[in-house]
Image (spheres, rainbow, N blue to C red):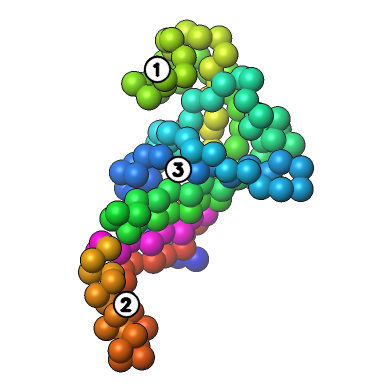
Amino acid sequence: MTDTKDDISKVWELVDKIGFCMLTTQSGGTLRARPMSAYANRDENAVYFLTDVASHKDEEIARHPEICLAFADSKGQKYVSISGTAEIRNDREKIRELWATPAKAWWDNAEDPSIRILKITPSSAEYWDSPGTVISYIKMAAAAVSSARPDIGDNAKVNL
């Protein structure tokens, strides 16, 4: 694991840019992932989500707060995996702060009493940032011909 400011900044930059992720929780003895719209806040070392009080993820997180967030920009060949701890909050001020157009697909307004905040406190992350699909394929093809390992971009593991 590295802790360089550049690598930590890169994680937050990619999370902010990609915006959507798969949130993985533990459900009994299995893992369950679902797509979520993320709101990253580096200053608070937190990734926030709006969630519904009736969702199953609340129960899963109460039992097993350890989660994984997987962000992917497959077109740009940029990926981030974050491990952390989740908690559900009924923070009405934060809900109003995070209220945005995507939330309107699920609720009428920020005052809906069923909305909750899902706060993720990251502990570690890993990112992969390549120059893009075409360049990556060219580098992989060249490496296959030369029996060398391709350099397809930056990769780092960081503590957050």
Q: Eyeballing the image, is 55 above or below 140?
A: above
**Image quadrant of residue 28?**
top right
Q: Residue at x 61, y 19 (%)?
A: 53
- Say which residue label 2 marks: 140
The image shows residue 141 at horizontal and vertical percentages of: 29, 80
- The crowd level at tag 2 (other Cα within 10 Å; few <14, some 14-19, many 20+) is some
What is the secondary structure assignment of the residue under circle 3? strand
Task: Give the camera-side residue of 160 and 111.
Answer: 111
- Say which residue label 3 marks: 21
The image shows residue 56 at horizontal and vertical percentages of: 66, 29
- The crowd level at tag 1 (other Cα within 10 Å; few <14, some 14-19, many 20+) is few
Q: CA distance from mark 1 to mark 2?
A: 42 Å
Q: Residue at x 55, y 9 (%)?
A: 113
Q: What segment carries the magenta color?
A: 123-132
The image shows residue 111 at horizontal and vertical percentages of: 47, 8
- Whichever of callouts 1 and 2 sits on the residue coming sooner in the sequence is 1
**Image quadrant of residue 40?**
top left
- Say which residue label 1 marks: 104
The image shows residue 31 at horizontal and vertical percentages of: 66, 47
